[in-house]
């Protein structure tokens, strides 16, 4: 069995894990290994999303101030990085529309939130019906927010570029490798042993070669598998994963000039703004409708075959211990039941999904949509009471950092969150800062302002 020794092992080469590997290797000479079960960085959620650099007007500043600030700074981080790397950063803005009085009240609340979260008057404004018609004549609504500080990118391309930059910083990257066991002593600072299987390629059916990594510190940024890593380390957190598949339909060329902006509707369920289907203009110019959020049984449940394969194991997992009680508690909540049923109907019926967008884009016809876009899986934690966890969870122990439920601000906030976590590790003595802050992409002031403004709570165990 081959053994690698390192200072820091990072599990997961999604956009956050890859960004962390780049940031830490830019600040420190620490030996770092980045391990990923797929054959390339950003293979799953980091490449399967709307591609938006979101402005923070949908975040309640009293409940999500730190995450809102992460999104705010994220715009400048990604703009600077993409400019330096000649990656398309399309400053196309976004419009959130309300079709009734209730939605209009939310629009004004979102304007207030946006200003409290750091947006300026030039970034965001309220539009009345006639003002919307002058900008987007094909939109039907009562009122809208127009936000100019919103952009479109290809996060998959960005993640792969970051992986190259991390490699140039001498980060050792191990792909096609799945962690199968972790040996550690929770209450000590002793090294952690990761046992993993490395496969010749991600499509092979061979058993793979078992190898191991010994590290001083572990960063768990494994996305949909992060809870599995926590369980391997026997932390006994009372969480369960639920998976939602976001689905898209690609608009035909006849709709290319239907709008100039991506159009989002006011979320029906305020705590789940990711659910309602939107009209999306991607960085490559494609127009799409999506995503809905259909419940599935696996973090890889992109199709029916995989979901059927995972159905019984997931049901068994739910039935163990208190999990079945969690699920009962969750589905006894009227709002959750309505949410799940609506999303499943949107998944089963293209017409139903398109009709949800037709409320504000009435020229759409469901028969015109014949090609599906790339689906993505969102993993959401629920607690022991069956409640959805709506914020990321950061758990710190003597020799590990676990990042769970990292959905929002997601890719937008990856650099912001990455810098804040890296400097917390420096304060803790895990990382020795023996390099000056790299200013090739970012001015030092941007980084230091971000660290000051973006507040993250670490749960210590």
Image: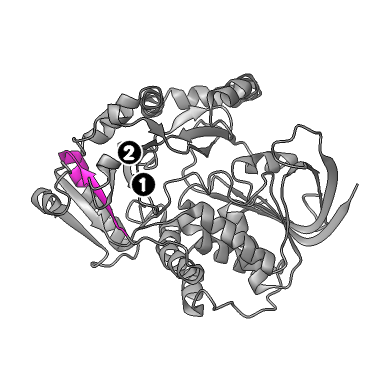
Foreground residue among 184 and 354: 354
Q: Quadrant of residue 460?
A: bottom right
Q: Which residue is mark 2?
A: 251
Q: Which residue is mark 1?
A: 286
Q: Is residue 159 above or below residue 120?
A: above
Q: Residues within 10 Å of mark 2 (few under 14, many from 20)?
A: many
Residue 146 lies in the magenta-colored region: no
Q: Is residue 205 left or right of residue 134?
A: right
Label 1 residue SS: loop
- Point out the stretch of residues depicted in magenta: 92-106
Question: Percent position (x, y) of residue 363?
Answer: 19, 36
Question: Percent position (x, y) of residue 226?
Answer: 64, 44
Q: Residue at x 74, y 69 (%)?
A: 30
Q: Is residue 86 left or right of residue 301?
A: left
Q: Residues within 10 Å of mark 1 (few under 14, many from 20)?
A: some
Question: Percent position (x, y) of residue 298?
Answer: 58, 30
Q: Residue at x 48, y 33 (%)?
A: 245
Question: Percent position (x, y) of residue 241?
Answer: 57, 34
Residue contact at pointers 1 and 2, CB within 8 angstroms: yes
| Residue 359 in sight | yes
Q: Is residue 220 left or right of residue 111?
A: right
Q: Residue at x 18, y 45 (%)?
A: 104
Foreground residue among 386 and 181: 181
Q: Is residue 308 left or right of residue 253?
A: right
For this orientation, the residue located farthest to the left is: 130
Distance between the alpha carbons at the discs numbered 1 and 2: 8 Å
| Residue 106 in sight | no
Label 2 residue SS: loop
For this orientation, the residue located farthest to the front is: 253
């Amino acid at each position: 069995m081959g053994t690698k020794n390192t200072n820091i092992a990072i599990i997961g080469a999604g956009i956050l894990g890859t960004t962390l590997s780049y940031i830490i290797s830019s600040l420190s000479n620490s030996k770092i290994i980045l391990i990923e079960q797929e054959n390339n960085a950003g293979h799953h959620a980091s490449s399967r999303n709307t591609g938006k650099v979101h402005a923070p007007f949908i975040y309640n500043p009293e409940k999500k101030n730190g995450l809102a600030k992460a999104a705010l700074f994220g715009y400048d981080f990604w703009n600077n990085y993409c400019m330096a790397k000649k990656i398309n950063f399309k400053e196309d803005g976004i419009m959130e529309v309300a079709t009734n009085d209730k939605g209009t009240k939310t629009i004004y609340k979102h304007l207030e939130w946006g200003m409290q979260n750091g947006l300026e008057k030039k970034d965001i404004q309220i539009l009345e019906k006639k003002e919307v018609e002058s900008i987007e004549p094909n939109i039907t609504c009562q009122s809208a927010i127009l936000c100019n500080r919103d952009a479109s990118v290809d996060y998959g391309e960005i993640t792969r570029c970051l992986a190259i930059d991390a490699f140039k910083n001498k980060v050792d990257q191990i792909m096609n490798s799945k962690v199968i066991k972790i040996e550690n002593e929770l209450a000590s600072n002793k090294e952690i042993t990761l046992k993993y299987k490395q496969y010749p390629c991600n499509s092979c059916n061979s058993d793979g070669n078992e190898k191991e990594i010994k590290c001083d510190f572990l960063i768990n940024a494994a996305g949909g598998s992060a809870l599995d890593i926590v369980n391997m380390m026997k932390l006994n957190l009372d969480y369960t994963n639920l998976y939602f598949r976001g689905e898209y339909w690609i608009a035909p060329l006849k709709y290319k000039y239907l709008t100039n902006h991506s159009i989002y509707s006011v979320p029906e369920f305020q705590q789940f703004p990711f659910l309602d289907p939107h009209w999306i203009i991607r960085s490559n110019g494609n127009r799409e409708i999506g995503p809905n959020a259909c419940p599935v049984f696996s973090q890889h449940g992109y199709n029916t075959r995989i979901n059927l394969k995972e159905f019984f194991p997931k049901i068994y997992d739910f039935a163990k211990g208190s999990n079945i009680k969690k699920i009962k508690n969750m589905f006894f909540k009227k709002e959750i039941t309505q949410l799940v049923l609506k999303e499943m109907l949107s998944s089963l019926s293209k017409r139903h999904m398109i009709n949800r967008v037709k409320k504000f884009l009435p020229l759409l016809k469901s028969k015109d949509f014949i090609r599906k876009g790339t689906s993505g899986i969102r993993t959401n934690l629920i607690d022991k009471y069956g409640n959805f966890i709506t914020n990321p969870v950061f758990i710190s122990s003597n020799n590990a950092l676990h990042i769970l439920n990292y959905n929002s601000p997601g890719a937008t906030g990856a650099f912001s969150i990455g810098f804040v976590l890296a400097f917390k590790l420096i304060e803790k003595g895990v990382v020795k800062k023996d390099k000056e802050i790299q200013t090739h992409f970012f001015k030092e002031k941007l980084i230091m302002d971000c660290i000051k403004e973006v507040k993250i709570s670490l749960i210590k165990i």
